[in-house]
Amino acid sequence: MMSHYLLASIDMGEGRSELHQLLHLTGAEISCNTLPAGVSIPFVHAHTENEEIYLVLDGSGQLYVDGEEVVIRRGDCFRIDPQGLRCLRAAGDSPLRYVCIQVRAGSLGNFTQSDAVVLQDGPKPSWL
């Protein structure tokens, strides 16, 4: 039975894969991105409602936010307010791989500990 989930796959070698339509997302936009070495997003942008959360998976580069340039590298994570003027560039010697998550700013009501319901009885996977 697959009524409560949707499994899909993306090509991690693609430059950009958006998961909104692929997974029928209703509360977030998620994209997996790769900027080739030395390449920049070709525009500066902001949002009207959505904050963005970035997770750098591999490589290094620069983050531009509101006139400030910051070095970023594998393992870095950062959040940008909707109004923040932003742009990214990969370092000249390596691609920059990152995940970007967009959600409406101020919309998080609950998170893992306050939203999860742990089942003590009932069906379990073979490894429990």
Image (cartoon, rainbow, N blue to C red):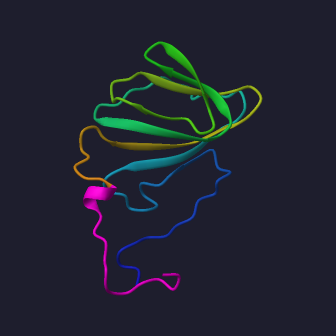
Residue sitting at x 53%, y 82%: 127
Percent x, y of residue 99: 53, 44
Up the image or down, 80 lies above or below 122; here it is: above
**Depth order, front residue of 55/16:** 55
Q: Is residue 101 left or right of residue 74?
A: left
Residue sitting at x 51%, y 25%: 87
Instruction: Residue 125: say if magenta.
Output: yes
Say how many tags the image has: 0
Percent x, y of residue 88: 56, 27
**Depth order, front residue of 71/97:** 71
Percent x, y of residue 113: 31, 57
Q: Is residue 124 left or right of residue 91?
A: left
**Depth order, front residue of 107/77:** 77
**Depth order, front residue of 61/115:** 115
Give the farthest residue toward the right.
Answer: 93
Q: Looking at the rendering, in which quadrant would you find the N terminus?
A: bottom left
Instruction: Residue 27: say if magenta.
Output: no
Residue sitting at x 47%, y 55%: 19
Give the farthest residue toward the top.
Answer: 67
Up the image or down, 17 lies above or below 46; here it is: below
Percent x, y of residue 44: 48, 23
Q: Main secondary structure of the magenta part?
A: loop
In the figure, residue 42 lies in which quadrant? top right
Magenta residue span? 112-128
In the figure, residue 120 lies in which quadrant? bottom left
Residue sitting at x 24%, y 44%: 107
